[in-house]
Amino acid sequence: MRSPTSSFRMVKWAIFLSQYNIDIRPRPAIKGQALADFVTECTVRSAVDEEPSTPSDEWWTLYTDGSSATKECGGGVVLITPEGFRVYYVIRFSFKVSNNEAEYEALLCGLRLAANMKARQIHVKCDSKLVVGQISGKYEAKELLKVFEAHSLTQIPRAQNSEADILSKLSAESPEHLSKIARIEELNLSSIHASPIMDIHLRPENWISDIINFITTGQLPEDENRTKLAKVRAPSYTLEGGRLYKRSYNGTLLRCLHQDEVEVAMEEVHSGSCSAHQGPFSMSQRLIVQGYFWPTVAWDCANLARRCAACQHFQKGPGRPAVNYAPISTAITFSRWGIDLVGLLPRGTFNNRYIIVIILSSKTSSQGSVSPNKSSPTTKLSLR
C-alpha cells in the first residue's frame, strides 16, 4: 500500500481484506515441502498387535441318522440352533444305498444345511461308528468341515438319537402333515464319489527280471537254463532309472520290453501310422532303430506278418514252381527236321540249279546246325 508503484486495484483489495485480520506468510520452498510430504507418507508406522479372535460360545448341535430298506432308503437330520430352535430335515434317496452309505449321506446333508445357515461351530452327534471314523479322519478326508471354525464329533447310543431315527424311517412314506414340521428333500445323486478301481496285473518272471535280479542282488532263478542265459546276457545289459537296457554294437542303449509291451510296439510299427505293413526284416530293423529290443524280435515280427490278414491277401505270388521242370518231347510235324538249301549251281541235267537237303534226326541236334550230325543216324532227301 505504501509503495508508490502499487496499482489502484491492489490497494483497493488490501483495504477490503484488512478488516478480516489476515496474516500473510511467505510460501516455503517447493522442494522442501515435497520432501516433507514424502517422509510423512513413507514412514513405517508401528503395527498394532491385534488379539486373535476367539470363537464364540454359540455351538450348533447336529443329529443325523440313515436307514436302508428294501423299497426305499432315507435319512433324517435334526439341527439345533444355539437358542434351542430345532430344524427337522427329511431326505429321500432315489438310488439304492447301504445302511452305512445312508448314514454318511445324512451327515453330509446335515453339514450342508448347517453351512447354509451360517453356523460357525458345530457339534455332530451320530450313532454310527463308521461315520465317526469318517469324520475323525480314519477313513476319508473331511472337506465339508473346513467351512466351520470349530467342530466336534460324538458317538451316542441310538436311544439318544431317536428324533433323527424317526425322521429317517418316515422318509420312505412321508405323510402329508410331515411337510409342515420338516423340510423334505429328494437326493437323486450320491454325494460319495467312488474312485474307479484299476486292475493290477503282476507281470510273471521273465528274462528281464532274471537279468535285473542278477545285476542288482546276484540272485539267480532256480531253472538251470534260465540261470545260464542270465549269466551269459548280463554283461551286455545295464540298468538306468530302474529300467533294463541293452548295449548295441555302436554303444546305443536299447530299451528292453516286456511281453505286453512287445505286442503294442509291433502293432504300432506294422499297422500303426499310415499302415505300412512292412515285412519281418524291415519291421525288426525299425524297432531296433526306434530303440527297443527283446531277444526274439525277428521271430516275433515274422510271426506277426504271417498272422496279418492284409499282408497275406496283398502279398506277391511266388514265381518259383512247385516241382522241378521236366523235358517234354513235341509231336509237331517237321519240328526236328533240318533243311539245307544249296545254290545257285551251274545248269545240269534237267536244267536244275538248286538243291534242297532235308535232314531227319532221331536225336536232338544242336541249334543253328545246317549240316547233318555225324553222331546220330540221319536220312537225306533230295527235292528237285
Image (cartoon, rainbow, N blue to C red):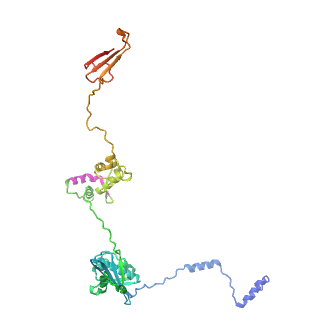
> Is 376 above or below relative to 116?
above
Q: Which residue occupies 35% across, 17% down? A: 341
Q: Which residue occupies 25% across, 51% down? A: 232
Q: Which residue occupies 27% across, 54% down? A: 234
Magenta: main secondary structure: helix
> Is 377 above or below relative to 299?
above
Give the percent coordinates (x, y) of residue 229: 24, 52
Please state, as top left, top right, bottom left or bottom right, where the N terminus lies in the image: bottom right
In which quadrant of the rendered view does residue 369 lie? top left
Give the camera-side residue of 151 and 108: 108
> Is 342 above or below relative to 295?
above
Give the camera-side residue of 286 and 103: 103
Can residue 238 be seen here? The reply is no
Give the percent coordinates (x, y) of residue 179: 36, 84
The span shown in magenta is 225-239
Give the camera-side residue of 339 and 84: 339
> Is 73 above or below relative to 366?
below
* Horizontal relation, residue 183 to residue 2: left or right: left
Give the percent coordinates (x, y) of residue 333: 29, 24
In which quadrant of the rendered view does residue 166 lie? bottom left
Please state, as top left, top right, bottom left or bottom right, where the C terminus lies in the image: top left
> Magenta span has 229?
yes
Residue farthest top in this picture: 349
> Magenta span has 28?
no
Give the percent coordinates (x, y) of residue 295: 28, 51
